[in-house]
Amino acid sequence: MSCACIHQSETLPRVPTRRPERNRVPGRSLVAFQGVRSYSRCMATLDDPGVKALLDAPNHAVISTFNPDGTIHSAVAWQEVVDGALHVNSAVGRRWPTNLDADPRATVVVVAQDNPYDYVEVRGTATRTTDGADEQIDRLAKKYLGQDRYPFRRDDEQRVRYVLTADRVRHQKQR
C-alpha cells in the first residue's frame, strides 16, 4: 500500500525558558524562540500517483553527490523509473559518476517544469552498471528531446547508468 506524504508545520511561540545554570550563556536572553516544528505522517514512495506523474514527465533531475573533499557536487541529469527504482544516466569520467563510484550516497531532486514548488526528493544509494546504458540514453533522448537516438554521443564515450535504491522519498507540492 502506498501512502501520500502529508507534511504539517506549526510555528511555536516565544516562551520564557530558564536555562540551568550549568548551560547558561552569559549575555543571552532567557526568552528562547522554540522555532518551527514540522513532521510527516509517512514517507512517499515512487509509486504514489503524484510522484509517478512527476517522474514520468520530462522533468529534469538534479543529482547531488559527495566530492572527495566532502563538498557537494550537483548536476542536472535525465532520469527514469524502471522496475520501481530511479535510474540516471551519464558517461564514464564525468564528475558525478566518479563521485558515486567512490561514495554511493546520492540525492536526486526532480522539479516540475511548470511548478517549481512541485518536486520529489529521493535519497539513497546508487549502484553502477553499464548493462543497458546505451539503450537507456536513447530512451531518455526520446523522453527529453523527442529524438530516437541520443544526438550528443561521442565515439570514445562509454555510457553508464546508476540505479538509486531509495532510503527516503519526499514529495512536496504547493497547492
Image: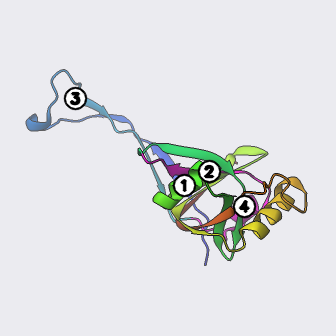
In which image quadrant can residue 18 be found? top left
* Residue lying at 19% horizontally and 20% vertically, measured from the top left: 27
Does dot 1 land on a helix, a strand or a loop?
helix
Q: In this view, does 145 lie to the left or right of 110?
A: right
Residue 24 in view here: yes
For the view shown, which residue lies furthest in the front direction? 156
Say above or below: 105 vs 24. Answer: below
* C-alpha gap between disc 1 and disc 3: 49 Å
Residue to which mark 3 is pinned? 30
For the residue pair 108 and 39, the one nearer the viewer reads as: 108
Horizontal and vertical percent for residue 97?
58, 56
Image spot of residue 144 (x, y percent): 82, 55
SS under mark 2: loop
Q: Was residue 60 drawn as part of the magenta stretch in this picture?
A: yes
Q: Name the residue under label 1.
A: 98
- Name the residue beneath numbered marker 4: 55
Q: Do the residues labelled 2 and 1 touch (CB within 8 Å)?
A: yes
